[in-house]
Amino acid sequence: MSPPASTKAAAPRFAVTTVAEQAADALRRKIMAGDLPDGYQLRQDALAAEFGISRIPVREALVQLEGEGLVRIVPHKGAVVSELSVAEINELFMLRGLLEPLLLKKSAPKLTAADFAEIDAILAEYREELHTQDPTRWGELNTRLHDVLMSRAEQPRTLAIVAGLLQQTDRYTRLQLSLSADSCRRAEDEHEELVRLCKTGEVRAAAGLLKRHIEHAAAELERFILSRRRP
Protein backbone atom coordinates (compact mmCIF):
# COMPACT_ATOMS: atom_id res chain seq x y z
CA MET A 1 0.00 0.00 0.00
CA SER A 2 1.41 3.38 -0.98
CA PRO A 3 1.86 6.02 1.73
CA PRO A 4 -0.45 9.03 1.64
CA ALA A 5 0.64 11.97 -0.51
CA SER A 6 1.14 14.17 2.56
CA THR A 7 3.67 11.68 3.96
CA LYS A 8 5.60 11.67 0.69
CA ALA A 9 5.78 15.46 0.70
CA ALA A 10 7.18 15.50 4.25
CA ALA A 11 9.95 12.92 3.59
CA PRO A 12 13.44 13.95 4.75
CA ARG A 13 15.73 15.34 2.09
CA PHE A 14 18.72 13.37 3.39
CA ALA A 15 19.35 9.63 3.31
CA VAL A 16 18.13 8.08 6.54
CA THR A 17 21.44 6.43 7.46
CA THR A 18 23.47 9.65 7.13
CA VAL A 19 21.08 12.40 8.16
CA ALA A 20 23.25 13.88 10.94
CA GLU A 21 26.45 13.68 8.87
CA GLN A 22 24.86 15.38 5.87
CA ALA A 23 23.30 18.05 8.08
CA ALA A 24 26.72 18.68 9.64
CA ASP A 25 28.28 18.88 6.17
CA ALA A 26 25.67 21.39 4.98
CA LEU A 27 26.18 23.58 8.04
CA ARG A 28 29.98 23.27 7.78
CA ARG A 29 29.89 24.57 4.20
CA LYS A 30 27.70 27.52 5.22
CA ILE A 31 29.99 28.43 8.12
CA MET A 32 33.21 28.10 6.13
CA ALA A 33 31.75 30.13 3.28
CA GLY A 34 30.88 32.92 5.73
CA ASP A 35 27.13 32.60 5.10
CA LEU A 36 26.67 32.09 8.83
CA PRO A 37 28.78 34.77 10.60
CA ASP A 38 30.55 34.53 13.96
CA GLY A 39 28.10 34.55 16.84
CA TYR A 40 25.13 33.57 14.67
CA GLN A 41 22.58 31.58 16.70
CA LEU A 42 21.78 28.18 15.22
CA ARG A 43 18.19 27.35 16.14
CA GLN A 44 17.49 23.63 16.00
CA ASP A 45 13.84 24.01 15.00
CA ALA A 46 14.66 26.39 12.14
CA LEU A 47 17.47 24.16 10.88
CA ALA A 48 15.25 21.07 11.09
CA ALA A 49 12.61 22.86 9.01
CA GLU A 50 15.20 24.08 6.49
CA PHE A 51 16.67 20.60 5.98
CA GLY A 52 13.35 18.78 6.21
CA ILE A 53 14.51 16.54 9.07
CA SER A 54 13.79 16.10 12.77
CA ARG A 55 15.61 17.99 15.53
CA ILE A 56 17.52 14.88 16.73
CA PRO A 57 19.96 14.68 13.78
CA VAL A 58 20.30 18.48 13.87
CA ARG A 59 21.36 18.23 17.52
CA GLU A 60 23.87 15.48 16.61
CA ALA A 61 25.22 17.62 13.77
CA LEU A 62 25.73 20.59 16.10
CA VAL A 63 27.60 18.42 18.60
CA GLN A 64 29.84 17.19 15.78
CA LEU A 65 30.57 20.76 14.66
CA GLU A 66 31.32 21.74 18.25
CA GLY A 67 33.98 19.03 18.22
CA GLU A 68 35.48 20.68 15.12
CA GLY A 69 35.56 24.11 16.76
CA LEU A 70 33.04 25.64 14.35
CA VAL A 71 30.16 25.81 16.85
CA ARG A 72 29.88 26.61 20.56
CA ILE A 73 26.99 25.26 22.61
CA VAL A 74 26.18 27.92 25.20
CA PRO A 75 24.03 27.21 28.30
CA HIS A 76 20.55 28.82 28.08
CA LYS A 77 21.28 30.05 24.54
CA GLY A 78 21.94 26.97 22.45
CA ALA A 79 24.39 26.64 19.58
CA VAL A 80 26.16 29.63 18.03
CA VAL A 81 28.80 29.90 15.32
CA SER A 82 32.19 30.11 17.06
CA GLU A 83 33.94 33.45 17.12
CA LEU A 84 37.45 32.78 15.85
CA SER A 85 40.01 35.39 16.85
CA VAL A 86 43.09 35.92 14.67
CA ALA A 87 44.82 37.74 17.53
CA GLU A 88 44.22 34.84 19.93
CA ILE A 89 45.41 32.28 17.40
CA ASN A 90 48.56 34.24 16.63
CA GLU A 91 49.44 34.67 20.31
CA LEU A 92 48.79 31.05 21.31
CA PHE A 93 50.62 29.56 18.33
CA MET A 94 53.48 32.05 18.65
CA LEU A 95 54.06 30.90 22.24
CA ARG A 96 53.90 27.27 21.16
CA GLY A 97 56.35 27.97 18.34
CA LEU A 98 58.81 29.44 20.84
CA LEU A 99 58.50 26.93 23.68
CA GLU A 100 57.87 23.54 22.03
CA PRO A 101 61.08 23.47 19.92
CA LEU A 102 63.11 24.40 23.02
CA LEU A 103 61.55 21.54 24.99
CA LEU A 104 62.00 19.12 22.09
CA LYS A 105 65.73 19.90 21.88
CA LYS A 106 66.10 18.94 25.54
CA SER A 107 63.75 15.97 25.41
CA ALA A 108 64.52 14.20 22.12
CA PRO A 109 68.00 12.87 23.05
CA LYS A 110 66.55 11.32 26.21
CA LEU A 111 63.52 9.59 24.67
CA THR A 112 63.57 5.86 25.37
CA ALA A 113 62.56 2.84 23.33
CA ALA A 114 59.38 2.68 25.41
CA ASP A 115 58.69 6.35 24.62
CA PHE A 116 59.05 5.72 20.88
CA ALA A 117 56.81 2.65 21.12
CA GLU A 118 54.14 4.86 22.69
CA ILE A 119 54.71 7.55 20.06
CA ASP A 120 54.38 5.00 17.23
CA ALA A 121 51.10 3.76 18.73
CA ILE A 122 49.77 7.33 18.92
CA LEU A 123 50.84 7.97 15.31
CA ALA A 124 49.06 4.83 14.13
CA GLU A 125 45.86 5.82 15.95
CA TYR A 126 46.16 9.41 14.73
CA ARG A 127 46.59 8.21 11.13
CA GLU A 128 43.48 6.04 11.41
CA GLU A 129 41.39 8.88 12.87
CA LEU A 130 42.55 11.31 10.16
CA HIS A 131 41.57 8.86 7.44
CA THR A 132 38.08 8.38 8.89
CA GLN A 133 37.56 12.15 8.65
CA ASP A 134 36.11 12.22 12.18
CA PRO A 135 37.72 15.20 13.97
CA THR A 136 36.49 14.26 17.45
CA ARG A 137 39.87 12.94 18.64
CA TRP A 138 42.27 14.90 16.40
CA GLY A 139 43.10 17.49 19.03
CA GLU A 140 43.50 14.89 21.79
CA LEU A 141 45.88 12.71 19.75
CA ASN A 142 47.86 15.72 18.55
CA THR A 143 48.31 16.83 22.17
CA ARG A 144 49.36 13.33 23.30
CA LEU A 145 51.95 13.12 20.53
CA HIS A 146 53.47 16.49 21.36
CA ASP A 147 53.37 15.72 25.09
CA VAL A 148 55.34 12.48 24.79
CA LEU A 149 57.90 14.02 22.42
CA MET A 150 58.61 16.77 24.99
CA SER A 151 58.19 14.66 28.12
CA ARG A 152 61.94 14.11 28.83
CA ALA A 153 62.83 17.81 28.83
CA GLU A 154 62.96 17.92 32.65
CA GLN A 155 61.46 21.40 32.71
CA PRO A 156 58.17 20.93 34.54
CA ARG A 157 57.14 24.59 34.64
CA THR A 158 57.62 25.10 30.91
CA LEU A 159 55.91 21.78 30.20
CA ALA A 160 52.93 22.91 32.29
CA ILE A 161 52.72 26.14 30.29
CA VAL A 162 52.85 24.24 26.99
CA ALA A 163 50.22 21.77 28.22
CA GLY A 164 47.91 24.73 28.81
CA LEU A 165 48.66 26.15 25.37
CA LEU A 166 47.91 22.79 23.72
CA GLN A 167 44.60 22.61 25.58
CA GLN A 168 43.68 26.14 24.49
CA THR A 169 44.53 25.42 20.85
CA ASP A 170 42.71 22.07 20.75
CA ARG A 171 39.65 23.39 18.90
CA TYR A 172 41.84 25.35 16.49
CA THR A 173 43.86 22.21 15.75
CA ARG A 174 40.70 20.28 14.92
CA LEU A 175 39.43 23.13 12.76
CA GLN A 176 42.73 23.50 10.90
CA LEU A 177 42.84 19.78 10.12
CA SER A 178 39.23 19.82 8.91
CA LEU A 179 39.86 22.61 6.37
CA SER A 180 41.02 20.24 3.62
CA ALA A 181 42.41 16.82 2.85
CA ASP A 182 45.76 18.53 2.21
CA SER A 183 45.79 19.81 5.80
CA CYS A 184 45.35 16.28 7.14
CA ARG A 185 47.94 14.86 4.77
CA ARG A 186 50.51 17.53 5.65
CA ALA A 187 49.96 17.05 9.40
CA GLU A 188 50.37 13.29 9.04
CA ASP A 189 53.55 13.63 6.95
CA GLU A 190 55.10 16.24 9.25
CA HIS A 191 54.39 14.24 12.40
CA GLU A 192 55.95 11.12 10.90
CA GLU A 193 59.02 13.07 9.74
CA LEU A 194 59.30 14.73 13.16
CA VAL A 195 59.37 11.35 14.87
CA ARG A 196 61.87 9.99 12.35
CA LEU A 197 64.23 12.90 12.98
CA CYS A 198 64.01 12.36 16.74
CA LYS A 199 64.73 8.65 16.33
CA THR A 200 67.82 9.31 14.21
CA GLY A 201 69.17 11.96 16.56
CA GLU A 202 68.66 14.88 14.16
CA VAL A 203 67.40 17.07 16.99
CA ARG A 204 68.10 20.49 15.45
CA ALA A 205 66.24 19.51 12.27
CA ALA A 206 63.36 18.12 14.35
CA ALA A 207 63.06 21.36 16.33
CA GLY A 208 63.06 23.40 13.11
CA LEU A 209 60.36 21.22 11.60
CA LEU A 210 58.23 21.49 14.74
CA LYS A 211 58.43 25.29 14.62
CA ARG A 212 57.42 25.37 10.94
CA HIS A 213 54.62 22.87 11.64
CA ILE A 214 53.13 25.14 14.32
CA GLU A 215 53.58 28.31 12.26
CA HIS A 216 51.92 26.74 9.21
CA ALA A 217 48.85 25.78 11.26
CA ALA A 218 48.51 29.36 12.54
CA ALA A 219 48.92 30.83 9.06
CA GLU A 220 46.35 28.46 7.55
CA LEU A 221 43.84 29.31 10.26
CA GLU A 222 44.41 33.04 9.82
CA ARG A 223 43.84 32.79 6.06
CA PHE A 224 40.63 30.83 6.64
CA ILE A 225 39.23 33.30 9.19
CA LEU A 226 40.04 36.38 7.07
CA SER A 227 38.62 34.75 3.93
CA ARG A 228 35.16 34.32 5.43
CA ARG A 229 34.87 37.87 6.74
CA ARG A 230 32.84 39.97 4.39
CA PRO A 231 34.03 43.51 3.45
Image (tube, helix red, strand yellow):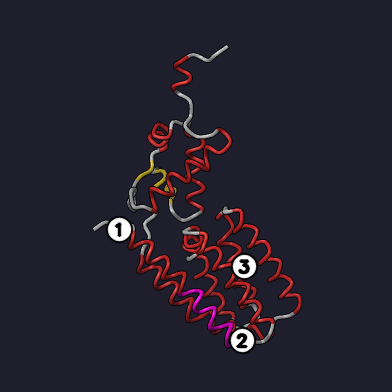
Which-is-in-front pick, marks 3 and 2?
A: 2
Label 2 sits on residue: 203
Pointer 2 or 1: first along the chain: 2
- Name the amino acid, label 1: Arg
Q: In the picture shown, does residue 183 fall above or below 79?
A: below
Give the number of marks. 3
Label 1 sits on residue: 229
Asked whether, in this view, residue 102 is left or right of residue 219, the answer is right
Determine whether the residue tagged by mark 2 lies in a helix, strand or loop.
helix
Determine whether the residue tagged by mark 1 lies in a helix, strand or loop.
loop
Give the numbered dot on residue 205: none
Q: Residue at x 43, y 51 (%)?
A: 71
Tell me which corner region of the image, top left, top right, bottom left or bottom right, holds residue 139: bottom right
Q: Which residues are magenta?
A: 204-215
Mark 2 surroundings within 10 Å by alpha-carbon count, few (fewer than 14), some (14 through 19), many (20 or more): many
Q: Position of residue 205 (x, y in %)?
A: 57, 85
Label 3 sits on residue: 144
- Name the amino acid, label 3: Arg
Q: Residue at x 50, y 58 (%)?
A: 178
Pointer 3 or 2: first along the chain: 3
- Name the amino acid, label 2: Val
Asked whether, in this view, residue 91 is left or right of residue 17, the answer is left
